[in-house]
């Protein structure tokens, strides 16, 4: 009789609640850690774009390039039609602007969809850009600058453009 009571009191480990409770907590930790790792690898942080300089542990907007554009009296209008984009610039000294300008279309969240191209001067105040190889994202921030990026103008691009996009020194 005593042998039967001892057998009933001892159960195998896999029939105990607390074993599965603690293994479940550890398993949830492994699953959530793996999920965070997977999400982090597939959604890497994007580059910070703009006129920023590190100051301690924060980035500070210096606005140097926008201030330089204001000094030069720069503003522009961008027109996109078919495979041709045209820039019309206004400046204090339009003749001192370079013959080639850099046009960048920056996607708001995905840096891999950013595109850049060089516009060439065709007239005193007009530059043209062949859009055949350049496919801008459906929504983008447009940045116009000289090739050395000493100044820049910015505006917003949204899909098919009906009319012109104004580009001005970026003042946030």
Image (cartoon, rainbow, N blue to C red):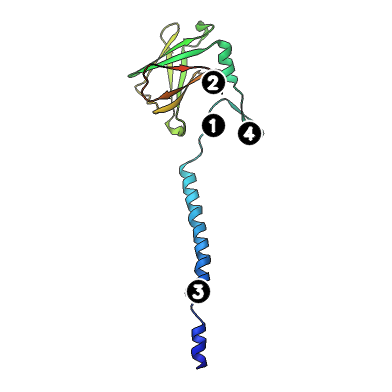
Residue 84 at x, y percent in the picture: 35, 17
Q: Residues within 10 Å of mark 2 (few under 14, many from 20)?
A: some
Mark 4: secondary structure: strand
Whole-Å distance between the Cαs marked 2 and 3? 66 Å
Asked if disc 3 and disc 4 are in contact, CB closer than 8 Å, the reply is no
Whole-Å distance between the Cαs marked 1 and 2? 15 Å
Q: Which mark sits nearer the N-terminus, 2 or 3?
A: 3
Q: Which mark sits nearer the N-terminus, 4 or 1?
A: 1
State which quarter of the image contains the C terminus: top right
Q: Nearer the viewer, residue 144 or 19?
A: 19
Q: Is residue 120 left or right of residue 53?
A: left
Q: Which mark sits nearer the N-terminus, 1 or 2?
A: 1
Based on the displayed image, in which of its 4 quarters is residue 131 positioned? Answer: top left
Residue 108 at x, y percent in the picture: 46, 31
Q: Is residue 163 left or right of residue 3?
A: left
* Residue occupying image coordinates x 52% and y 7%: 96
The residue sitting at the right extreme is: 56
Q: For residue 58, which numbered disc appears in the image?
A: 4
Q: Residues within 10 Å of mark 3 (few under 14, many from 20)?
A: few
Mark 2: secondary structure: loop
Mark 3: secondary structure: loop
Look at mark 2 in the image and give the residue it sits on: 170
Q: For residue 16, which numbered disc appears in the image?
A: 3
Asked if disc 2 and disc 3 are in contact, CB closer than 8 Å, the reply is no
Asked if disc 2 and disc 4 are in contact, CB closer than 8 Å, the reply is no
* Residue occupying image coordinates x 50% and y 91%: 3
Look at mark 1 in the image and give the residue it sits on: 48
Residue 10 at x, y percent in the picture: 51, 82
Whole-Å distance between the Cαs marked 3 and 4? 52 Å
Whole-Å distance between the Cαs marked 4 and 1? 12 Å
Mark 1: secondary structure: loop
Above or below, comparing residue 59 to residue 38 in the picture: above
């Amino acid at each position: 009789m005593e042998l039967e009571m001892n057998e009933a009191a001892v159960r195998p480990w896999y029939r105990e609640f607390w074993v599965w409770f603690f293994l479940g907590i550890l398993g949830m930790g492994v699953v959530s850690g793996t999920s965070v790792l997977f999400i982090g690898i597939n959604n890497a942080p994007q580059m910070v774009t703009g006129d920023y300089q590190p100051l301690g542990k924060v980035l500070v907007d210096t606005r140097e390039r926008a201030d330089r554009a204001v000094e030069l009296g720069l503003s522009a209008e961008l027109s996109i039609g078919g495979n041709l984009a045209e820039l019309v610039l206004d400046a204090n000294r339009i003749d001192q602007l370079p013959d080639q300008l850099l046009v960048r279309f920056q996607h708001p969240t995905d840096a891999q969809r950013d595109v850049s191209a060089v516009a060439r001067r065709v007239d005193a105040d007009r530059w043209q850009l062949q859009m055949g190889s350049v496919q801008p994202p459906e929504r983008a921030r447009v940045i116009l600058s000289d090739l050395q990026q000493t100044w820049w103008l910015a505006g917003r691009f949204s899909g098919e453009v009906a009319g012109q996009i104004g580009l001005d020194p970026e003042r946030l």
